[in-house]
Image (cartoon, rainbow, N blue to C red):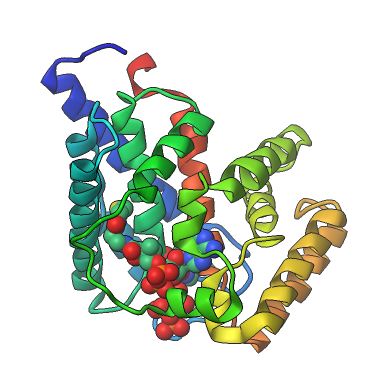
Amino acid sequence: MKLLPQIQVEGGAEWLARTATQCLIDEARLSPKPGLVDSRGNGAHHDLTLALMERSAHSLTPTFQALALQSWLRPADIALRQTVGRLGRVGEQAMMAATGGVNTHRGAIWALGLLVSAVAMLGGEANAPVIAATAATLAKLPDDAAPKVFSKGLRATHRYRVPGAREEAQQGFPHILQHALPQLRLSRRNGGSESHARIDALMAIMTSLTDTCVLSRAGMEGLETMQRGARAVLSAGGSATLEGQLALGILDRQMLTLNASPGGAADLLAATLFLDRIGTPYFKH
Ligand SMILES: CC(C)(COP(=O)(O)OP(=O)(O)OC[C@H]1O[C@@H](n2cnc3c(N)ncnc32)[C@H](O)[C@@H]1O)[C@@H](O)C(=O)NCCC(=O)NCCS
Ligand SMILES: Nc1ncnc2c1ncn2[C@@H]1O[C@H](COP(=O)(O)OP(=O)(O)OP(=O)(O)O)[C@@H](O)[C@H]1O
């Protein structure tokens, strides 16, 4: 691993932060996403808009930059875990200040924050499996300074005995590595547009994620509807095909009827786009 002058570290951190923000914006604009905020509208959300999501994404750039700078070539230890936890909470405050108190990106700060830190720990250059494994090592460490809050996500994981956002990270983001990235690349190879490939990657996540946003709002019926509907889109040939688009339309209507929104899957799509982009390392530009 090469040691870089501070100016290059700062440039690398800035690039990581800008890339993470751009992935949040790309995710938010991508359409049509069932139940979620997209370029068409607010989906199942009454307090979210695309403009708010974009404002929130921009408010997080300094947080991602600070995470990258503080993590640069550092080992995964308790001291770094505490720093990352503190910066993540500062990011949540910045998000809340930018949105007037609306939760636009809590799950996304968690997933992308850990991945930005992991790339920086690896000196700015690594492949997706190594980055995800490094992020998992960090996520598994305890953060004693974390306030003991009983969140909606935690309540859903206890009630339904399923893994949530914490576990997804601690397991090394299996929905990104085993579902979303392979589907993104397969759909691109099959000649679909970039938007179709991204929608298919979202569907691949939704086929099996236990998304606590969906569970909190629509229970197990909502989760099963999401997983079944996403499988139907992919087995119809994906969103580039007419059959796939029909299945996607059905799923969209079902999610709206159930007031369900796969916010966790959306976060993991943004994180997938980030890992996909990091495949072209900054220092090789
Ligand atoms: C772990 C987090 C996401 C809290 O999770 P929890 O499940 O308790 O609560 P909450 O309902 O507030 O948020 C969960 C969010 O995760 C996303 N999500 C839901 N289900 C899943 C899933 N199965 N996999 C991944 N993400 C999911 C959704 O966006 C959801 O809104 C996070 O807010 C946290 O604890 N942050 C502490 C700061 C920190 O340590 N940061 C370090 C990295 S920056
Ligand atoms: N395009 C998107 N549309 C909606 N949510 C998204 C989108 N992208 C990511 N998310 C994620 O979804 C989460 C918001 O979901 P939700 O509104 O269900 O959370 P909540 O505020 O805890 O619950 P509620 O709105 O039911 O009170 C955010 O943490 C965010 O990271």
Q: Position of residue 143 (x, y in %)?
A: 25, 56
List x then y, in percent, for residue 165.
47, 61
Name the residue nearer the viewer: 163 or 244: 163
Q: Residue at x 30, y 41 (%)?
A: 18
Instruction: Using the rendered image of the protein, determine whether residue 118 is visible from the camera's viewpoint.
Output: yes
Q: Quadrant of the C terminus?
A: top left
Residue at 41% over, 35% down: 134
| Side of 42 where 149 appears, left or right | left
In the picture shown, does residue 179 fall above or below 118?
A: below
Note whether residue 264 is visible: no
Residue farthest top in this picture: 2
- Determine the residue located farthest toward the left in the rendered image: 6
Q: Is residue 243 above or below residue 222?
A: above
Residue at 18% from the left image edge and 56% from the top image edge: 86
Q: Quadrant of residue 191?
A: top right
Percent position of residue 263, x then y: 51, 68
Q: Position of residue 184 (x, y in %)?
A: 65, 41
Asked if residue 281 is positioned above or below residue 179 in the image, the reply reads: above
Q: Quadrant of residue 185?
A: top right
Position above or below: 165 against 116 = below
| Residue appearing at x 20%, y 50% in the figure | 82
Q: Quadrant of the N terminus?
A: top left
Figure quadrant, ligand 1: bottom left
Number of disc labels: 0
Q: Quadrant of residue 189?
A: top right
